């Protein structure tokens, strides 16, 4: 009983800060995206491709979450966007307080799109609201077809599911049909994008959706 109470207190406190983050994003008409996946799925590569595609259209920034290193943040910084690194020192997720503190380091005047690259994990990040507008989960063909059924919560709460490494399909036994069926069964409202971070296949459709979501946020703000 004590453990359940403690968990409720932690999540309750987090939600208070998340609402504050959300209000701040809304006030400044910033679309905030919580990008989640298991380790090695290609979140940083997807961000690099996205920044390249939208650099002339949107002002972007990235909050980069990692356990200990800043290697991914260095990659993003080379793309010319503002990056704030959060090292969790072993914690398996970002929380709303971490995002709030990191966001204060961003010159957000004119900012339109904020990515939060969460810690690589398909369990813990699903529990913590950051105040984001959209949750996006990245999966890969090389991980196999069992991730959605093993970790349903994170996929159930996502507004979009991105399947990466489709260029490797011929070298795997991954089933696109099973993937689509699993997503539709767990989360029929989720948008599905199929991309290759290596070749750039599917990036245009993904970035067009982002543009539409940013414009919608601005028009309804």
Image (cartoon, rainbow, N blue to C red):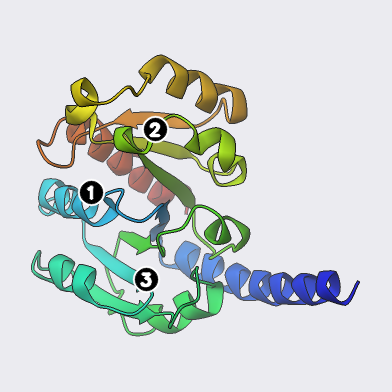
Q: Mark 1 Cα within 10 Å, few/some/many (few <14, many 20+)?
A: many
Q: Earlier in the sequence, mark 3 or mark 1?
A: 1
Q: Earlier in the sequence, mark 2 or mark 1?
A: 1
**Which of labels 2 and 3 is toward the front?**
2
- The secondary structure type at the circle numbered 2 is loop
The image quadrant of residue 84 is bottom left
- The secondary structure type at the circle numbered 1 is helix
Q: Which mark is residue 46?
A: 1
Badges 2 and 3: C-beta atoms under 8 Å apart? no
Question: For the residues marked 2 and 1, what is the alpha-carbon distance in whole angstroms?
Answer: 19 Å
Residue at point 42% right, 53% down?
36
Question: For the residues marked 2 and 3, what is the alpha-carbon distance in whole angstroms?
Answer: 25 Å
Q: Is residue 165 shown left or right of residue 118?
A: left
Q: Position of residue 55 (x, y in %)?
A: 12, 54
Q: Position of residue 176 (x, y in %)?
A: 37, 19
Establish if 221 lies above or below 103: above
- The secondary structure type at the circle numbered 3 is strand
Q: Position of residue 152 (x, y in %)?
A: 60, 39
Closer to the camera, 96 or 123? 123
Q: To which residue does mark 2 refer?
A: 144
Establish if 206 lies above or below 114: above
Badges 2 and 1: C-beta atoms under 8 Å apart? no
Establish if 8 lies above or below 175: below
Q: Is residue 101 shown left or right of residue 209?
A: right
The quadrant of the rendering that contains the N terminus is bottom right
The image quadrant of residue 161 is top left
Question: For the residues marked 3 and 1, what is the alpha-carbon distance in whole angstroms?
Answer: 15 Å
Q: Which mark is residue 65?
A: 3
Q: Mark 3 Cα within 10 Å, few/some/many (few <14, many 20+)?
A: many
């Amino acid at each position: 009983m004590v453990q359940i109470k403690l968990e409720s207190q932690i999540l309750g406190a987090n939600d208070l800060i998340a609402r504050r983050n959300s209000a701040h994003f809304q006030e400044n008409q910033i679309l905030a995206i919580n990008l989640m996946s298991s380790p090695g799925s290609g979140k940083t590569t997807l961000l690099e491709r996205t920044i390249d595609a939208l650099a002339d259209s949107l002002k972007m920034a990235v909050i980069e979450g990692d356990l200990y290193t800043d290697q991914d943040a260095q990659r993003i910084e080379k793309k010319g966007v503002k990056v704030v690194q959060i090292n969790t020192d072993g914690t398996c997720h970002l929380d709303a307080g971490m995002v709030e503190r990191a966001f204060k380091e961003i010159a957000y005047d004119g900012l339109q799109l904020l990515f939060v690259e969460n810690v690589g994990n398909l369990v813990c990040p699903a529990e913590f609201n950051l105040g984001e507008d959209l949750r996006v989960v990245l999966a890969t063909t090389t991980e196999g077809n069992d991730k959605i059924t093993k970790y349903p919560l994170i996929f159930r709460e996502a507004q979009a599911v991105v399947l990466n490494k489709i260029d490797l399909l011929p070298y795997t036994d991954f089933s696109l049909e099973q993937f689509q069926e699993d997503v539709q069964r767990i989360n029929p409202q989720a948008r599905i994008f199929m991309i290759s971070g290596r070749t750039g296949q599917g990036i245009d459709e993904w970035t067009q959706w982002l543009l539409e979501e940013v414009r919608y946020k601005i028009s309804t703000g």
